[in-house]
Amino acid sequence: MNDTLMPTYMRQPVAFLRGSGVWLYDENGRAYLDALAGIAVCGLGHAHPGVAAALADQAATLIHTSNLYRNPLQEALAALLTEVSGMNNCFFANSGAEANEGALKLARLHGHSRGIANPAVIVMDNSFHGRTLATLSATGNVKVQKGFEPLVEGFIRVPFGDIDAIRAAAHNHPNIAALLVEPIQGESGVRLPPQGLESYLEQLRTLCDQHDWLMMLDEIQTGNARTGKYFAFQHSKILPDVVTTAKGLGNGFPIAAVLAAGKATHLFQPGMHGTTYGGTPLACRVALTTVQALLQGPMENARLQGIALQQAFQKRLGHLGVEVTGLGLMLALVLPVSALPLVERGREAGVLFAVSSENRIRLLPPLIISTEECALLVDRLSSVVESYLREVAGA
Ligand SMILES: *Cc1c(COP(=O)(O)O)cnc(C)c1O
């Protein structure tokens, strides 16, 4: 298509020129219902007027000064995020992977403060934490790691949801300093802990307290109101030590955050971590606008539409062996067969989504999706799934 771009992505043969709310428009002006939202990024939908106005106004006022000076917008965003989450303080970065790098550095500092020379972090099968060397090493997917060996050391992998495996790891590895986990696994196709989110998080909190590990949650995808609470951990009563977030934080403008509480709060001292761009006045102004707008109604909408969508898909597709799962507007339809051909068929039917782990249709629509748009999504996608499953059964 364009050999001046590195072929890191198998791109679909469509280009979108503008968007509005849950809708994207291609070069021919055709409208698509966007149930992916830039991979869980545009929670407020496309071309949100408040975000656009904040971005334009701040761009005409002050974009960047560096982290060598005080930054009132960064302080305001940190105050808002800590208030919303119950965490103590924040470090701002530019992408999810970078936020996780910050978290992994905190884990190592915590380990060293306990006198551990080679601290290790427990990570999960089927996890995704990013594409930098440390975060791809933490990721539980060999496809992400292949070709980039030697991997960064210091990760111990266990099955997601398996508390006994963590107990065994604790027994075998005295050098563990932290645990890094997605409350709901996103890239591997919206996987909830088998024992339930609340119970899993409570079990992890207890183990981290017993062993003096940092409990680190990767909420890059589950955060920013996606699951119907601001952070997914808020479906439970626990407070983690570290939370990373990114995707939905700037509604498409790049910004990420590492939030710390408890014993993680004071690990970073001056000079230990940094970034040129992280938390610019522009990024923080956009994120402030985004977070405030998400709390105004989209978060509750995500909770309610999520329940309604699960029921509607269950009713339309449940009898065909399709399993409906997820929380808020982080949903998956798990097919009894490969769902890979459906991305193209869906697009042709005017609905955009992703497929993960071969048979899991991932739905991550904007959190502002209306009841009518949800009905349209159910109708268009169910029709595509029904005719595909009929075809597969007939073949
Ligand atoms: C997307 C994602 C990342 C990586 O974020 P980037 O901004 O692409 O670096 C890390 N962890 C999770 C859970 C994600 O969904």
Image (tube, helix red, strand yellow):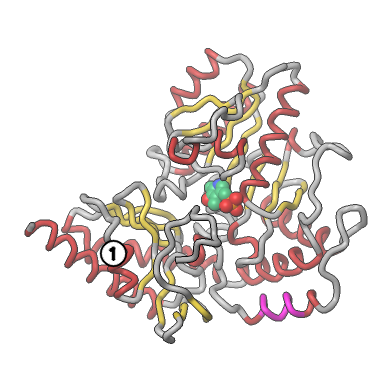
Q: In terms of image quadrants, where is residue 217?
A: top right
Residue 339 horizontal side relative to residue 370, left or right: left
In the image, what residue occupies the spot 42% across and 40% down? 193
State left or right for residue 152 relative to residue 144. Answer: right
Q: Nearer the viewer, residue 222 or 47?
A: 47
Count of numbered circles in the view: 1
Label 1 sits on a secondary structure element that is helix
Q: Residue 323: image x %, image y %?
A: 27, 53
- Residue at the extreme right: 69
Q: How far from the left and from the top, in percent, is residue 92?
A: 74, 52
Please tell me which residue lies in front, 67 or 180: 67
Q: Residues within 10 Å of mark 1 (few under 14, many from 20)?
A: many
- Where does the magenta region start and end? 50-56
Which residue is at 83% across, 58% downward?
75
Question: What residue sits right under mark 1 in the picture?
Answer: 313
279 up-or-down from 121: above or below: below
Classify residue 390 as left or right of residue 316.
left
Image quadrant in which the N terminus is located: bottom left
Magenta highlight on residue 197: no
Residue drawn at x 55%, y 76% is 46
SS assignment for the magenta stretch, majority: helix
Tag 1: residue type?
A: Phe
Residue 380 figure quarter:
bottom left
Q: Is residue 147 visible?
A: yes
On the image, the x and y values in percent for residue 203 come to 51, 32
Using the image, determine if residue 361 lies above or below residue 32. Answer: above
Residue 55 is a magenta residue: yes
Q: Quadrant of the C terminus?
A: bottom left
Residue 125 percent across, percent down from the top left: 44, 34
Determine the residue positioned at 63% across, 17% down: 175
Q: Is residue 176 left or right of residue 31?
A: right
Q: Residue furthest left?
A: 394
